[in-house]
Amino acid sequence: MTTALKIDFVSDVSCPWCAIGLSALEKALERLRDEVAAEMHFQPFELNPGMPAEGQDITEHLTQKYGSTPQQQAESREAIRLRGASLGFVFRKEGRNRIYNTFDAHRLLHWADLATTQPAGLQRALKKALLEAYFTHGESPASHEVLLQAVGRVGLDSERAREILAGDQYADEVRERLYQDAGIHAVPAVIINDSYLISGGQPVEVFEQALRRMASGKAEN
């Protein structure tokens, strides 16, 4: 007998730890496939809402934001690449060249989550396609061409996506700051059944234990 769990995955497509966290969560869910049935929703969290569409040099950005040196950034990049590889997610060895605005990516992800519009599971497929476009292939998540290609690859309506990108639909939903106002200031943040929070790109075992406890009704946050 499986237990249904609602999972809100709060993240940004420009966050490498979100790619790691999602990969680990999916492996945990696969291990628990006979115990847990997950209803997943990907919620918007813009790490850099003021970022221009053309983006910023990644070394410059990380130095300004965290005070890290290029050497520290290179070491962190390699650690992230190896962690991703252990979970089956491929980060480009040379890393990212730029950081980009992700507002339009979040608008399309919100659209893909509308149950009356899209088949179940396509939002997750689009999220993974966008993470791979950026981190594996070095493409810009601010580019409408890249976004539309990802939409088409996962089987969503490309023409409808083009209409959304041409207007301002779902802007309010992306910018409502629901999770920031609830006290979440870093991603990924994984919320199970609206009550249990797991922060960061945790190991598979951490997700597995939390999911099993939530399914049994024994979890405390």
Image (cartoon, grey):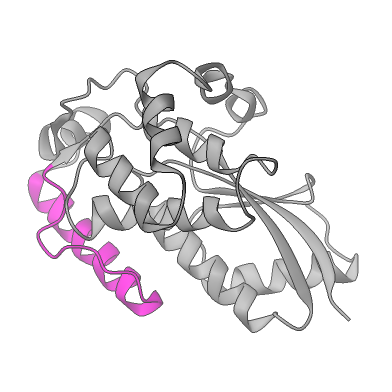
Counting labels gives 0
Q: Nearer the viewer, residue 94 or 3?
A: 3
The answer to whether residue 182 is left or right of residue 169 is right
Majority SS type along the magenta span = helix
Q: For this rendering, which residue is in front, 52 or 16? A: 52
Residue at position x 59%, y 34% in the image: 184
Identify the image quadrant of the N terminus: bottom right
The picture places residue 141, in percent across and down from the top left corner, at 28, 39
Residue at screen point 34% across, 69% down:
89
Q: Could you tell whether 173 is left or right of 166 in the image?
A: right
Comparing 52 with 71, the one in front is: 52
Q: Is residue 178 above or below residue 71?
A: above
Rendering quarter of residue 43: top right
Where's residue 86, x and y in %? 35, 79
Q: Looking at the image, which is closer to me, 88 or 74?
A: 88
75 magenta-colored: yes
Question: Picture coordinates of residue 45 (x, y %)?
Answer: 49, 33
Residue at 35 percent of width and 20 percent of height: 166
Residue 196 lies, with reference to residue 43, above or below; the image says: below
What are the residue bounds of the magenta stretch? 70-97
Looking at the picture, does residue 45 appear above or below residue 97? above
- 170 sits left or right of 87 in the view: right
Asked whether residue 33 is drawn in magenta, I would say: no
